[in-house]
Amino acid sequence: MIEVSKKCIGCNKCVPVCPFAAINMIDKKATMNEACTLCGVCVQVCPVQAITITREEASARDLSGYKGVWVYVELSETGDKTHPKKIKQVTFELLSAGRKLADELGEDLCAVLLTDKNHGYEKELGEYGADKVYMVEHDELFEYNTDIFSSVIVGLVTSHKPSIMLYGATIQGRDLAPRVASTLYVGLTADCTALAIKDGLLLQSRPAFGGNIMADILAPRSRPQMSTVRPNVMKLAEPVHGRAAVVVRESARLDKSLRRVKVLERKIDHGAGTARIENANVIVSGGRGMKTKEKFKQLEEISKLLGGVVGASRAAVDLGFKEKTHQVGQSGTTVSPKLYLCFGISGAVQHIVGMKASDVIVAVNKDPNAPIFNVARYGIVGDVNEIVPKLVEALKKGK
Ligand SMILES: Cc1cc2nc3c(=O)[nH]c(=O)nc-3n(C[C@H](O)[C@H](O)[C@H](O)COP(=O)(O)OP(=O)(O)OC[C@H]3O[C@@H](n4cnc5c(N)ncnc54)[C@H](O)[C@@H]3O)c2cc1C
């Protein structure tokens, strides 16, 4: 419920910022009409705190109206209006996971796309499983902005009432999802590693207590049930060529003054490794068992010969063998290359959660009981000091 108190001074600040044209100034008092989605933008701009929104805890009856699994579509940041942005792979991963959830619930899977210009995005979204694409096209959506994007999402959610909403645990998703959750007064489970349906509810699993236990989280009393999922965690389904999604165009009236933050300059550092490790097809990782920085460098050679990149366990990073941006695992990057080679890594749970989705894992460890062998397809029990030089030699010969 939205209320305007006697404090309203009729300053008119809330009228132009409302994305849904839901406010009229009547007798010098802001008055909301039926287009109001409770997005909360007017509350933010009111200089005298005259507007309040009360969000009641949903009752079981209220929840029955919430249907559908939504996936937030994240586009790449090109910083240049002349190059069409691409849909980030994490969106397709979430659609792949969302498809299974939607099928189990017997509901629609919907993609939510906010963009300044549609470049036929619905084609790929449909092929990766979306039944519908809710699309908002507006110049103000050219680049991501917390205030603008969250107010549009809150408006769409309030109007269409999805039961589940998934975001990538990316820089953008980690910024957007909490803002949406706090505005709607619903929960958010960050960094989920598994999603399933249990008794009609979204079962959100994520590591807790430093990765020592898996916590299963349910949100029985609020909607939508919201989660973020890191890139490379959910398996990508094969796209179904020609599968089409229905496009539902939504309008939003967006004013520049909604933006409280202006991006003056964007500097992306691709040199340090994060971007490369996240998308690499081959990763050659080393752990404490490599013993020294010099020995660790031998892994660079293997990686070069295989056309891959070097990864590291947290212990190796802490010892200064490799930069933090190359760390694989719970507090590093989650990866899913075609080939993951690991040398002198024990296989602690915090490392495993970051690489277990790799297609083929090969582990070298001198301890036959090292937990890394539980997830490795091929294991070599032996000393890295002997095996690494032999492997380099064999790869050179093979070339
Ligand atoms: C909150 C939290 C977050 C964390 N996040 C991460 C994370 O993101 N990524 C991560 O990796 N860790 C993370 N950790 C740390 C994690 O618990 C482990 O401590 C770490 O993964 C161990 O790294 P390691 O396997 O290289 O070292 P160790 O556990 O010390 O294992 C070294 C292995 O090398 C083998 N070895 C030794 N010498 C040789 C040799 N000559 N030849 C062959 N094998 C040899 C040993 O048998 C041993 O198995 C986290 C921990 C916490 C609490």
Image (cartoon, rainbow, N blue to C red):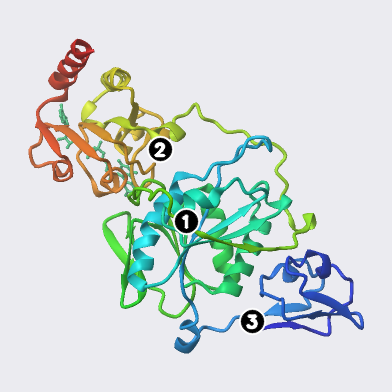
- Which of discs 1 and 3 lies nearer the camera? The answer is 1
Task: Kindly identify which numbered label has been placed on residue 244.
Answer: 1
Task: Kindly identify which numbered label has been placed on residue 278.
Answer: 2
Q: Is residue 304 left or right of residue 383?
A: right
> Quick one: which residue is furthest to the right in this view?
27
Q: Secondary structure at mark 3?
A: loop
Q: CA distance from mark 2 to mark 1?
A: 29 Å
Q: CA distance from mark 1 to mark 3?
A: 39 Å
Query: Which quarter of the picture shows residue 48?
Result: bottom right
| Quadrant in which the N terminus appears | bottom right
Q: Secondary structure at mark 1?
A: loop
- Which of discs 2 and 1 lies nearer the camera? The answer is 1
Task: Kindly identify which numbered label has been placed on residue 18.
Answer: none
> Quick one: which residue is furthest to the front in this view?
242
Query: Which quarter of the picture shows residue 190?
Result: bottom left
**Residue 252 x/y as whole percent:** 71, 63
Q: Is residue 7 left or right of residue 371?
A: right
Ligand 1 resides in the quarter of the picture at: top left
In the rendered structure, which disc, 2 or 1, sits on the residue that comes first in sequence? 1
Q: Is residue 277 or residue 388 the one in the foreground?
A: 277
- The reply to whether discs 1 and 3 touch (Cβ–Cβ < 8 Å) is no
Circle 3 is placed at which residue position? 54
Q: Is mark 2 within 8 Å of ligand 1?
A: no
- Which of discs 2 and 3 lies nearer the camera? The answer is 2
Q: Identity of the amino acid at label 3?
A: Thr
